[in-house]
Image: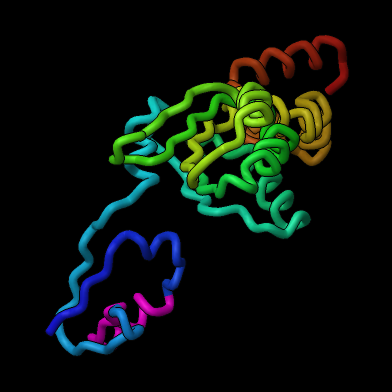
Amino acid sequence: EGGVFGTERLLRQDVRTVRAVGAVGNALFYGKRGPMNFIGPRFFIPGPSAFTCALVASGMPTGRFSFEGFLTTNNKNRKIHLEEIQDDTRTLIFYEAPHKLLRTLNDMLEFLGDRKIVFARELTKKFEEFYRTTISEAIKYYEQTPPKGEFVLIVSGADRESVRKKHRGELPSAEELLREYADGGLGGKELVKKVAAELEMPNREVYDIFLNMKKSNLI
């Protein structure tokens, strides 16, 4: 007999089991009495998946997304997680329980900013609900209306231009790099091309800075 795997594996994150199955030809089937081994072909069949259903119906960009699952209950690690993804421009997807929702939203507001967010719950059921708002407005709403049921949270990604400006501000200026590389022997097109690539700036913009520096004898 063969084994069957579904998309719930994404949440369980038990990738070692899946790798083992692929390596030795065994499959695990979760029955009422626990895991049972089967020898034979492996079939990977997509099953019910709340986050894909929520993403498609959310109206958020679906071209690129990141499934983050449940955030940890450890305060320090949860904040580290959010800090690590704050510059991710993809649509972000989370699962959250009702009793932890407000804490999660407040942390999101602190680390991700006041972004668009969609709350999805009771998917495919009679009382299916989608709530589209911003993180700050959601905090106000759920402070007055206690959340019920588990949620899928669809959060807009970071703004690309804001991320570029942020990282550009952490880098040396074009003038500093032009002077540094010119002192190292680079010149002309190679100098402009190298600085433009490093700062993710248009070549023409760097070239104009280069010409102005030459006219002022700064390079």
Q: Nearer the viewer, residue 26 or 219?
A: 26
The quadrant in which residue 106 appears is top right
Relative placement, left or right, of 73 versus 125 is right
Along the line of sight, the residue nearer the viewer: 12 or 215: 12
- Can residue 192 be seen by looking at this rendering? no
Question: Where residue 173 sits: x, y (%)?
Answer: 80, 27
- Residue visible at 35% across and 84% down in the picture: 34
The picture places residue 156, in percent across and down from the top left corner, at 52, 30
Q: Position of residue 149 (x, y in %)?
A: 49, 44
Q: Is residue 68 above or below residue 62?
A: below
Q: Is residue 48 magenta?
A: no
Given the current orientation, which residue lies at the most extreme left position? 1
Say whether residue 24 is magenta: yes
- Residue at position x 71%, y 45% in the image: 83
* Nearer to us in this view, 147 or 86: 147
**Coloring scheme used:** rainbow
Looking at the image, residue 154 lies above or below residue 77:
above
Which image quarter holds the C terminus?
Answer: top right
Residue 147: image x %, image y %? 57, 37
| Residue for point 23% across, 86% down | 25
Q: How many callouts does the rendering have? A: 0
Q: Nearer the viewer, residue 90 or 196?
A: 90
Residue found 21% across the figure and 88% down from its top:
38
Prevailing secondary structure of the magenta residues:
helix
Answer yes or no: is residue 131 visible.
Answer: yes
Give left or right: position of 11 versus 39: right
Tell me which corner region of the image, top left, top right, bottom left or bottom right, holds residue 29: bottom left
Question: Considering only vertical position in the picture, is 51 above or below 157?
Answer: below
Q: Residues in magenta? A: 16-30
